[in-house]
Image: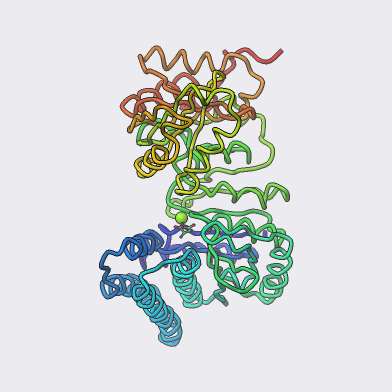
Amino acid sequence: MRLVMKFGGTGVNSSTKVKAISNLIKQHHDSKNDLVVVVSAIRGMTDDIFSITDNIKEGQKVSVENFMKNTRASHLDILRNAITDEAIMKKANLVVTQLLDELENVLRGIVLLAEVTPKSLDYLLSFGERLSAPIISYALQDIGIKSEHLTGREVGILTDSNFGEARPLMDTTRLRISHKLTPMLKDGVLPVVTGFIGADQNGITTTIGRGGSDYTATIIASSIQADEVWLWSDVDGLMTADPKIVRDAKVLKEVSFAEAMEMALFGAKYIHPRSFYPVIESKIPIRVRNAFNVNHEGTVITQSLTKASQKIVKSISAIRHTALIDVSGGEMAGSPGTASRIFDILAKKRVNIMMISQSPSESSISMVVRKSDLEKATTALELNLLGSIIKKVSVNDDVAVIAVVGSGMRGIKGVAAKIFGSVARRNVNVIMIAQGSSELNLAFVVNDDDCEMAVQALHNEFKLASSSGKQNDVPRKG
Ligand code: ASP
Ligand code: MG
């Protein structure tokens, strides 16, 4: 088989784990598979880069020394304990130390300027993956595998210049990747590619969005006609609910691309939603697996589901601790452009809106945003719109969004009644509701205090813990 295997940051954050995944890769390599490996930054590294650049932007004093001391220690420690061969160790050490030195120089320059542009931020962020890829590649060489490490640019991922959320230009990208990787695979070389990063037409480093390594993996898979993409992490697969809330939550065997996309937005295991596009066209299945529990089959995400997996409701997910903003005012009704002004103002402040609902009376719009964005959002709305088109901004600062996902919901009557009936029986108040016309999910908002109760109630109602999970008490269309 030709496989693209992606390892998340939790798979590479200690030398023991690096050795474990190297052996796992070797095992699949030895059984005559063509493999391409994609790696994320070591867990926490991307967040750390974001937080130091935030501090620089806010004019706070930052200690490049401290940051570099920790970063050097974590990376070199893994390297030194994961590789035994001295010659390989020497080479690896040189490559990684050079990258660390470069990172230090760039950081010092940015601190002097006290300015972080989206372009320089992407450059800084790229060090996370640029450091982890050689570590894995040399660890593979250490156990006898011919391997080379490549950056997103080197492998051929061409993007636009929208730093932070760059979009790959897929046709050129596919050609380049296939030209680059096919000969390597033919020669028995195992490429280890940095996730998350690409380069624009001028060769400037870009990143493709948080969690983008999954996306890198599917881009590569679609370029080399891989048979499957395997996303290895430290969970067994996609689940019927968050096991922290529902004790008998189950790993889902099979999920469709459409369902997975909905779950990606709401679920516990975050898959970059755009990751699905490259493989949907070419119908390449994605497997979500646990690198530290390899006997578990994990979840397969495919185009069409087997009969047993065609359920009305597949999972109940929740995004906890979010905030609800309700803007209202009589003048909002019947005046075109109101919604666009509201969203525009929030977009300019980089507030991401997770859910929207407007009543047909048009006199109010409710939005769910991250708690951390709440103040920014209300300030921007008050400054720009209060007193003109909106009269009132009210907030509820601790709500949860609950999403019920399943492709079998489409065209089936009574699902909503069942959902809200079951929630009402637990005395949970529903604050806001949204259902996309795709009917793949129905999402609603409750006070966060009620979240666990509602999720448990729905998990029971749709019998998600039992593997037969017959849900045929909901009337079929017709
Ligand atoms: N390191 C990047 C992030 O944390 C990409 C990834 O992990 O997939 O967002
Ligand atoms: Mg990640």
- Residue 318 percent across, percent down from the top left: 43, 33
Residue 32 visible to the viewer? no
- 415 vs 178, left or right, is left
The picture quadrant where one finds residue 83 is bottom left
- 69 vs 35, left or right, is left
Q: Residue at x 35, y 36 (%)?
A: 321
Residue 224 in the image: above or below residue 440 = below
Residue 317 in the image: above or below residue 98 = above
The N terminus is located in which quarter?
A: bottom right
Residue 36 visible to the viewer? yes
- Residue 390 percent across, percent down from the top left: 45, 29
The C terminus is located in which quarter?
A: top right
- Residue 444 percent across, percent down from the top left: 47, 26
Q: Residue at x 56, y 46 (%)?
A: 273
The picture quadrant where one finds residue 147 is bottom right
- Residue 403 percent across, percent down from the top left: 49, 30
